[in-house]
Image (tube, rainbow, N blue to C red):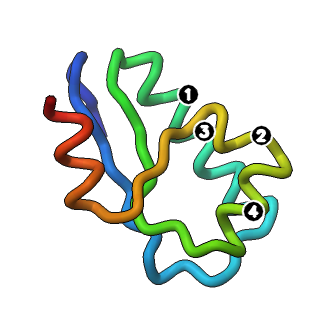
């Protein structure tokens, strides 16, 4: 996939109940690819357990997250 500069990519993880190191690696790689392309990668719908894991490993400092996809779209489109 090719991303254009200024594009926002929102990953809806509202159905995610578990995320191991493999999943985290995928998200980190996606973040780096988006950033290299000048795009923004954001998460939407993190459940509290996954959000806590992301806070513990510091991923919440790298990937912005929003309560819902709609909230992410509003925040990222101005």
Rounded to the nearest angstrom, the CA distance separating label 1 from label 3 is 5 Å
- Of the residues under marks 2 and 1, which one precedes in the sequence? 1
Q: Which of marks 4 and 1 is in front?
A: 4
Q: In the displayed structure, does residue 35 sit left or right of residue 59?
A: left
- Is residue 16 shown above or below 27? below
Q: Mark 3 points at which residue?
A: 29
Q: Are marks 1 and 3 in contact (CB under 8 Å)?
A: yes
Instruction: Give the quarter of the figure containing the C terminus.
Output: top left
Instruction: Give the quarter of the figure containing the N terminus.
Output: top left
Say which element carries label 2. Answer: loop
Q: Where is residue 20 in the image (x, y as percent from the top left)?
A: 78, 68
Q: Name the residue under label 1.
A: 32
Say which element carries label 3. Answer: helix
Q: Dividing the picture into quarters, in which one does residue 38 lie?
A: top left
Say which element carries label 4. Answer: helix
- Of the residues under marks 3 and 2, which one precedes in the sequence? 3
User: For this rendering, which residue is in front, 17 or 21?
Assistant: 17
Q: Nearer the viewer, mark 3 or mark 4?
A: 4
Rounded to the nearest angstrom, the CA distance separating label 3 from label 4 is 20 Å
Which residue appears at 52% of the width and 67% of the height? 46
Q: How crowded is mark 3: few (under 14 residues within 10 Å), some or many (20 or more)?
A: few
- Is residue 50 shown above or below 15? above
Q: Position of residue 48 (x, y in %)?
A: 64, 72
Q: Are marks 2 and 1 in contact (CB under 8 Å)?
A: no
Rounded to the nearest angstrom, the CA distance separating label 4 from label 1 is 22 Å
Residue 52 - label: 4
Residue 64 - label: none
Q: Position of residue 17 (x, y in %)?
A: 62, 83
Q: Mark 2 points at which residue?
A: 58
- Of the residues under marks 4 and 1, which one precedes in the sequence? 1
* Numbered label tally: 4
Say which element carries label 1. Answer: helix
């Amino acid at each position: 996939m090719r991303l254009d500069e200024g594009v926002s990519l929102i990953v809806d993880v509202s159905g995610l109940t578990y995320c191991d190191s493999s999943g985290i690696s995928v998200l980190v790689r996606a973040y780096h690819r988006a950033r290299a392309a000048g795009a923004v990668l954001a998460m939407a719908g993190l459940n509290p357990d996954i959000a806590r894991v992301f806070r513990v490993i510091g991923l919440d400092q790298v990937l912005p997250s929003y309560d819902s996809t709609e909230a992410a779209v509003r925040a990222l489109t101005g």
